[in-house]
Amino acid sequence: ALEGDYLLVGAPADIADVERSGRAYLYKRNAAVNPPRWDFVKQFEPAVRNRFGGFGTAVDLSGDRAAICYEKSDLATSSGDVFIYRRGANQTWSLEGTLPHVRSPYDSFGTTVKILGSRAMVGQRGQPTVLFYAHENGQWRQTASFSDLRWAHSVNFSGNNQAAAIEAGLLKTRVATYKLNGAAWVRTGDFQTPEMPPSDNRQFFAAMNSGVDLENGTLIVGGSGGQDESAVLQDMGYVYDLRNEEAFTAANLLGTRTTEWFAAAKGSPISYWIDV
């Protein structure tokens, strides 16, 4: 996660940690040297270190806040937590709190997280799958939850009060969209990327590593590809433009797809992460 001069990197299976509970590392860009470099600032780790706990599975930065997922913070239920840290006036980071939620076994709470100022959005497996939060009166509280998807693999929202979540599928990638209407989040759309033939296994990998981002009426859906029949690694992505500010529904899209691209390369997938 990158925000201004700060870079936050999650290491959910850090080999430097004997317990493999996970860590996260914070860096700051130093432009006073030539060439500029990234200087180490802080190491985040959980107070209770559960073996293979997945601390740092998902991370995000916004302003003076950092969000870090601890996928299996509770061993009794194999449930997760999202920790919110805040940078103080003296540039030290301290734990502000955790995002409240109802635990369920193997819920993968915090598999994906997005923070924007005093708001946060979390995806998980189970019910509900997409949760919204706000920091008010000194504490984080849940403001909305939706059970639209089976598993929210990626979530994102923007400064113009739009949000989107992605569900991975074998033949299609499903996208749910939301909008902040006053003080309440409401569901605004549900659509799927074009279906690929069942014999084309690129879609399976594209869905499993799917990502979503949006800003100012532009929505990007992307994911890494798998090997096709020619053993060539394929990546794909879809760009949608919003016709109005109400919803990312099929009727409001400029065509089924305004842009579609495929990139072929041998080696590692290239589009695990996307940005607008």
Image: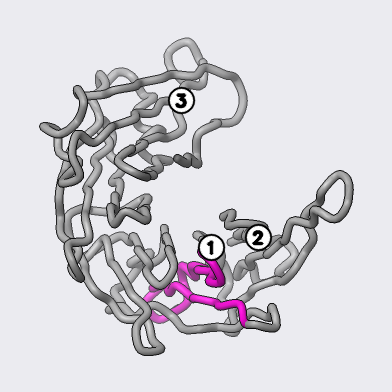
Q: Residue furthest right?
A: 34
Residue 99 sits in quarter = bottom left
x, y percentage for residue 268?
Answer: 59, 30
Q: Which of these two is toward me, 271 or 233? A: 271
Q: Position of residue 163 (x, y in %)?
A: 29, 53
What predominant SS class does the magenta segment belong to?
strand
Lower position in the chain sequence, tag 1 or tag 3: 1
Q: Which residues are magenta?
A: 61-88
- Which residue is found at the position 39% from the left and 40% from the top? 210
Q: Which residue is mark 1?
A: 61
Disc 3: CA contacts within 10 A as few (<14), some (14-19) or many (>=20): many
Estimate the x, y position of residue 155 in percent, counting from the top left. 35, 53
User: Which three-letter amino acid code belongs to the residue tagged 2?
Assistant: Tyr
Pick out the residue farthest to the top: 230
> Residues under labels 1 and 3: Cα distance?
27 Å
Name of the residue lying farthest toward the bottom: 137
Q: Which residue is mark 3?
A: 235
Front: mark 1 or 3: 1
Disc 2 + disc 1, Cβ < 8 Å: yes
Specify the label residue 6 is tagged with.
2
Q: Amino acid at mark 1?
A: Leu
Rendered location of residue 216, percent (x, y): 34, 44
The residue nearer to you, when weighing 88 against 175, is: 88
